[in-house]
C-alpha cells in the first residue's frame, strides 16, 4: 500500500483573471477594419469615426452575441459588427465568452496571444470564430498549427463534426505524408513542420489570412522556427494576422519578441486610419486600414477548472509503471466515480500498464468485494490505430470506469472528458542532443514542474479532482521549473537546411525566440558540409564540388542542396535517396525512405508482443531494417494491399497506405527538381540488395558504428546472448572518448552482430546504453569509397 501525502497548496492549474493588455491608443477606438474581404467593416463605423475618448478592448461578452445583429444592441463603438447568427462551435466553452474580444484584437493587431487552460476551446473554436467573421473569404484560408500529428487530425475531425461538414471539405488537416484537404478547405489544421514545408513553395504563405500557432508553450523545434520566420513574414504582409495560443502564462516573452512597433509604424497607422476616416466620411466607404497595430495583444481566457488536490508518495517508487498501476487500483477500490488518467513515458510502458491493469481488473472481478464500477483499461499513444483511439474519447458506458494509460499526448494536445483522477509518473520521454558527440537520442527525463501542473489540471475538468504524483514532495521540488525548449536539445541539421533553402544563409544571425546553442549550430553546419552526395567511385575533385550540399560560402548548392531541403525527409535519408540515383536503386530507396518516415508501421497489441515479434521475423533480412521494410512492402503489395493481411501481421494498414502516398510524393519531388527522368520508371536494382545498402550508407555514414566485442553478464543464464558492443566510427578521429552503443531489440539485427552498421537513430536506455535503431549492415570499405572526405582506410 503506498502512503500518500497531500500537498500544502490545494489548487493546481486554473487560469488567471480575464485581462487584456496592449497599447490602447485613439487608433484602437477607431478600429477601422474593412480589409476588403466582404466583411463590411468600416462602412457602418467609419462615418461615426471620431475619437471616442478612453478606449478599451471590449470586455468579455457575457451578453450573447446571437441576440444582437449588426448595428444594434450593447455593442460598444469599439466593437466590430458581428455576424448576426452564431452558428458554429460550442458556445458553452470558456473561450466563447471571449469571442468578440478575440475577433476585435485580431482585426486590429498583427499579433494576438491567447493564453488559456487546456480544454477551454482555443484550438477548436477560435478558427471557427475567424471563419464566421469572414477571414476565410476571397480564397483565403485559416491555418492552425499543431506540434503533434495526432492532434492535427483529431481536432480537424472534431471541428468538421461541430460544423456539420465532411472532413476534408471546409475543414481539413495536413500532416507529413497524410492529408485531408481540398481546394475548398477554409480551416486547415496542420503540423508546424508542414507549414514550414509550405513556406518553401510560398515564403509569404499568401494563401492564409490568419495563422494560428497553437500549443506554443510546448516550444517544439518547428514552432520556434516558425515563430522566427513568421516575424519576418509579418513585416512583408501587413494583411496577415498571427494568433499564438498557449496553455501557460508565459506570454511576456512572446509579446516582447513580436513587438515591432516603432514610432514610424505608429505614425503610418495613424495616417492610414485618418485617410480611411476621411474616405468613409466622404461617402467612399470601405477603405480599410491595412496597417495593424504592431504591439501584440494578449487575451487571457479564464478557464473553468475545478480545484485539484495533489498527493505525493511518502517513499520513492522503484518501478513507476507498477506504482502507477497500484495507485490506479487503489483509487478504483475507493469506489468513487470518475475516470482515471495515468501518464507514462512511452508506448511500451503504456502497453505494460494496460496488461497489468487488465489482470488486476480480472482479479477484482473474481474477488469477494463487489464494486459499483467495472474497470476498463485503455491505452493512448500516438501510434494507436484509429479505432482504439476513438474508444478512448468515447464516454464510458454506465457502470464502467475508464482507466486510460497515456503518453505525454494527453498532457495538452488532447482532452479527455470525465477524468477526475490523474496518476503522474513525473517522467517524460524527450529528445536530447549532445553537440560534442553529435548524438541525438530519446531518453526518459524528469518532468518539469510546469508540465506536471498541466497534467494535474487534467483532473479538474468535470469537478474537483485529485492528482497522484509518483514521487516524494521534496523530490518534486527539485524538478526543473520549465521544460527546456526542444531547440536547445536537438540536432539542428534539418532546421539549418530548411532555413538555408528559404534564403536565410546567416543562420547564426536569425532572430530566435531563444537562440539555439552555438555548438549545436556549428555542428549542424559541419554535418551539412560533410553530407555531400557521392557516387560510389570517387570522382575528380571539381565534380565532387558540384555535388555538394553547401558551397564555399556555406550556401546550399543549386541542385543537390536545394533538392535535399525540398525532400520531406530527414537529411540523411534524403541523401540516401539522392545517392540511389547513381546506384540504380531509386525504386527501392523510395520505398525504404517512405516506410522509415511514416510513423508506427508496426502496431503490436499490448498482449501480443511475442506474436508480433514472430510476424516481424518472417520479413527479416540479414541486410538490416531497411531491406526488411522492402520485404514488408512487397508482401503488402502482393496481398492486394489488404487491411486484414496487415492486421494479421501486426502491421498498421493506415501507415502502409500512407507510405504509398509518401512514395508517390517523393517520386514527384525528384522529378520536379529534375533529379529523375519524368518519362521512365525509377531505376531498380532487382533482387540485388547491395546497392540499397550502399545508398543507405551514403546517406547515413555519419551514423556508422563498428562491432567491438560482446559483453557477457557472468550472472545471466548460459543462453544469454550477451551485449554486442559497437563504437561510433567518426569519433575515432576526434579523440573524444569512444561512445559505446548497442543494437535496440526492435532491430532485426538485434541478435546478429554485423561487423559494421549504419543506423538511423539512437535511444538512450535506462541502463545508460545508447541503443541504435533502423540498422543496415555495411562494408567498412564502402564508407571509405562513399565518403572519402570523412573516412580513410586504417594503415
Ligand atoms: O485548445 P484547447 O485545449 O483550449 O481546447 P480544445 O482542444 O479546443 O477543446 C475544447 C473542447 O472540445 C474540450 O471540451 C474537448 O474535450 C472537446 N474536444 C473533443 O471532445 N474532441 C476532440 N477531438 C477535441 C476537442
Ligand atoms: Mg488546444
Image: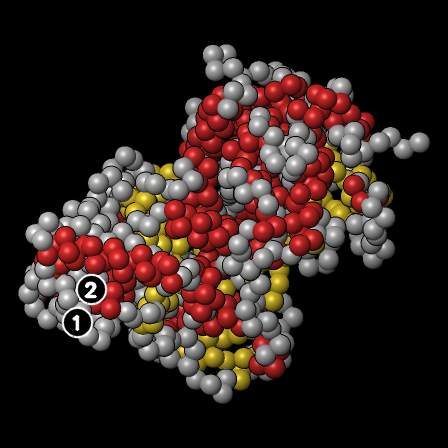
Q: Check the image and name the residue furthest to the right.
A: 795
Residue name at image x 62 percent, y 63 percent: 445
User: Residue 495, relative to residue 79: is it above or below?
Assistant: above
Residue name at image x 59 percent, y 45 percent: 506
Residue name at image x 74 percent, y 27 percent: 786
Label 1: element kind: loop
Which of the pair 239/760 is nearer the observer? Answer: 239
User: Residue 439, relative to residue 49: is it above or below?
Assistant: above
Which of the pair 336/416 is nearer the observer? Answer: 416
Give the side of residue 770 with respect to residue 415, left or right: right
The image quarter in which residue 112 lies: bottom left
Q: Position of residue 717 (x, y in %)?
A: 80, 52
Q: Check the image and name the residue furthest to the bottom.
A: 8
Give the side of residue 13 with respect to residue 615, left or right: left
* Mark pair 1, 2: CA separation: 8 Å
Which of the pair 324/535 is nearer the observer? Answer: 535
Q: Is residue 743 visible?
A: yes
Mark 2, Cα crowd under 10 Å, few <14 / some 14-19 / many 20+, is many
Quarter of the image that includes the C terminus: top right
The residue wearing badge 1 is 52
Q: Residue 30: which numbered mark, if any?
A: 2
Q: Residue 502: which numbered mark, if any?
A: none
Which of the pair 534/256 is nearer the observer? Answer: 256
Residue name at image x 49 percent, y 21 percent: 671
Cβ of mark 2 under 8 A from ligand 1: no
Asked whether disc 1 touches disc 2, contact meaning CB atoms under 8 Å apart, the reply is: yes
Amino acid at each position: 500500500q503506498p502512503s500518500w501525502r497531500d500537498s500544502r497548496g490545494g489548487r493546481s492549474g486554473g487560469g488567471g483573471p480575464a485581462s487584456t493588455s496592449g497599447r490602447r491608443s485613439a487608433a484602437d477606438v477607431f478600429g477601422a477594419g474593412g480589409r476588403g474581404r466582404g466583411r463590411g467593416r468600416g462602412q457602418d463605423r467609419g462615418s461615426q469615426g471620431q475619437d471616442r475618448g478612453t478606449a478599451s478592448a471590449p470586455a468579455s461578452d457575457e451578453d450573447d452575441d446571437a441576440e444582437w445583429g449588426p448595428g444594434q444592441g450593447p455593442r460598444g463603438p469599439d466593437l466590430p459588427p458581428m455576424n448576426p447568427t452564431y452558428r458554429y462551435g460550442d458556445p458553452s466553452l470558456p473561450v466563447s465568452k471571449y469571442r468578440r474580444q478575440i475577433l476585435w484584437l485580431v482585426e486590429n493587431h498583427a499579433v494576438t496571444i491567447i493564453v488559456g487552460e487546456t480544454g477551454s476551446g482555443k484550438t477548436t473554436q477560435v478558427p471557427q470564430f475567424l471563419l464566421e467573421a469572414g477571414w476565410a473569404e476571397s480564397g483565403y484560408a485559416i491555418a492552425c498549427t499543431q506540434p503533434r500529428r495526432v492532434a492535427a487530425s483529431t481536432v480537424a475531425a472534431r471541428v468538421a463534426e461541430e460544423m456539420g461538414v465532411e472532413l476534408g471539405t471546409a475543414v481539413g488537416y495536413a500532416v507529413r505524408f497524410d492529408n485531408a484537404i481540398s481546394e475548398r478547405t477554409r480551416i486547415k489544421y496542420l503540423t508546424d513542420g508542414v507549414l514550414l514545408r509550405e513556406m518553401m513553395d510560398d515564403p509569404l504563405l499568401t494563401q492564409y489570412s490568419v495563422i494560428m500557432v497553437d500549443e506554443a508553450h510546448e516550444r517544439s523545434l518547428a514552432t520556434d522556427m516558425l515563430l522566427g520566420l513568421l516575424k519576418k513574414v509579418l513585416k512583408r504582409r501587413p494583411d496577415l494576422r498571427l494568433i499564438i495560443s498557449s496553455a501557460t502564462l508565459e506570454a511576456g516573452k512572446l509579446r516582447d519578441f513580436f513587438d515591432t512597433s516603432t514610432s514610424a509604424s505608429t505614425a503610418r497607422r495613424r495616417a492610414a486610419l485618418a485617410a480611411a476616416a476621411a474616405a468613409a466620411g466622404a461617402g467612399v466607404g470601405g477603405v480599410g486600414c491595412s496597417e495593424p497595430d504592431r504591439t501584440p495583444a494578449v487575451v487571457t481566457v479564464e478557464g473553468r477548472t475545478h480545484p485539484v488536490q495533489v498527493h505525493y508518495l511518502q517513499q520513492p517508487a522503484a518501478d513507476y509503471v507498477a506504482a502507477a498501476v497500484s495507485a490506479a487500483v487503489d483509487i478504483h477500490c475507493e469506489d468513487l466515480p470518475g475516470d482515471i488518467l495515468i501518464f507514462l513515458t512511452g508506448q511500451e510502458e503504456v502497453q505494460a500498464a494496460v496488461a497489468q491493469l487488465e489482470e488486476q481488473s480480472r482479479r477484482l472481478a473474481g474477488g469477494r468485494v463487489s464494486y459499483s464500477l467495472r474497470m476498463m483499461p485503455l491505452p493512448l499513444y500516438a501510434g494507436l490505430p484509429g479505432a482504439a483511439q476513438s474508444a478512448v474519447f468515447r464516454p464510458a458506458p454506465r457502470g464502467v470506469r475508464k482507466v486510460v494509460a497515456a503518453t505525454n499526448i494527453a498532457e495538452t494536445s488532447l482532452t479527455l472528458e470525465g477524468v477526475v483522477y490523474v496518476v503522474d509518473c513525473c517522467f517524460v520521454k524527450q529528445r536530447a542532443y549532445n553537440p560534442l558527440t553529435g548524438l541525438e537520442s530519446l531518453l526518459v527525463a524528469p518532468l518539469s514542474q510546469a508540465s506536471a501542473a498541466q497534467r494535474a489540471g487534467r483532473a479538474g475538468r468535470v469537478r474537483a479532482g485529485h492528482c497522484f504524483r509518483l514521487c516524494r514532495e521534496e523530490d518534486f521540488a527539485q524538478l526543473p521549473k520549465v521544460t527546456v525548449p526542444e531547440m536547445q536539445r536537438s540536432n539542428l541539421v534539418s532546421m539549418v537546411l530548411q532555413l538555408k533553402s528559404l534564403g536565410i544563409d546567416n543562420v547564426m544571425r536569425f532572430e530566435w525566440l531563444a537562440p539555439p546553442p552555438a555548438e549545436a549550430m556549428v555542428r549542424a553546419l559541419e554535418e551539412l558540409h560533410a553530407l555531400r552526395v557521392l557516387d560510389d567511385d570517387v570522382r575528380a575533385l571539381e565534380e565532387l564540388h558540384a555535388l555538394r550540399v553547401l558551397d564555399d560560402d556555406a550556401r546550399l548548392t543549386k541542385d543537390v542542396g536545394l533538392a535535399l531541403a525540398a525532400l520531406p525527409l530527414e537529411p540523411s535519408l534524403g541523401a540516401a535517396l539522392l545517392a540511389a540515383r547513381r546506384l540504380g536503386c531509386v525504386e527501392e530507396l523510395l520505398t525504404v525512405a517512405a516506410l522509415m518516415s511514416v510513423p508506427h508501421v508496426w502496431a503490436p497489441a499490448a498482449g501480443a508482443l511475442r506474436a508480433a515479434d514472430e510476424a516481424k521475423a518472417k520479413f527479416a533480412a540479414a541486410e538490416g531494417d531497411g531491406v526488411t521494410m522492402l520485404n514488408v512492402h512487397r508482401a503488402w503489395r502482393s496481398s492486394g494491399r489488404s487491411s486484414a493481411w496487415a492486421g494479421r501481421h501486426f502491421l498498421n494498414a493506415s501507415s502502409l497506405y500512407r507510405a504509398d502516398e509518401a512514395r508517390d510524393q517523393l517520386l514527384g519531388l525528384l522529378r520536379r527538381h529534375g533529379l529523375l527522368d519524368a518519362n521512365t520508371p525509377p531505376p531498380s536494382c532487382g533482387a540485388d540488395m547491395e546497392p540499397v545498402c550502399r545508398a543507405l550508407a551514403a546517406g547515413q555514414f555519419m551514423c556508422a558504428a563498428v562491432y567491438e566485442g560482446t559483453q557477457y553478464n557472468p550472472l545471466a543464464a548460459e543462453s544469454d546472448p550477451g551485449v554486442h558492443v559497437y563504437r561510433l566510427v567518426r569519433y575515432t578521429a576526434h579523440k573524444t572518448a569512444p561512445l559505446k552503443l548497442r543494437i535496440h531489440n526492435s532491430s532485426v539485427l538485434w541478435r546478429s552482430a554485423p561487423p559494421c552498421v549504419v543506423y538511423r537513430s539512437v535511444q538512450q536506455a535506462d541502463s545508460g546504453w545508447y541503443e541504435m535503431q533502423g540498422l543496415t549492415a555495411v562494408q567498412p570499405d564502402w564508407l571509405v569509397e562513399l565518403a572519402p572526405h570523412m573516412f580513410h582506410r586504417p594503415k
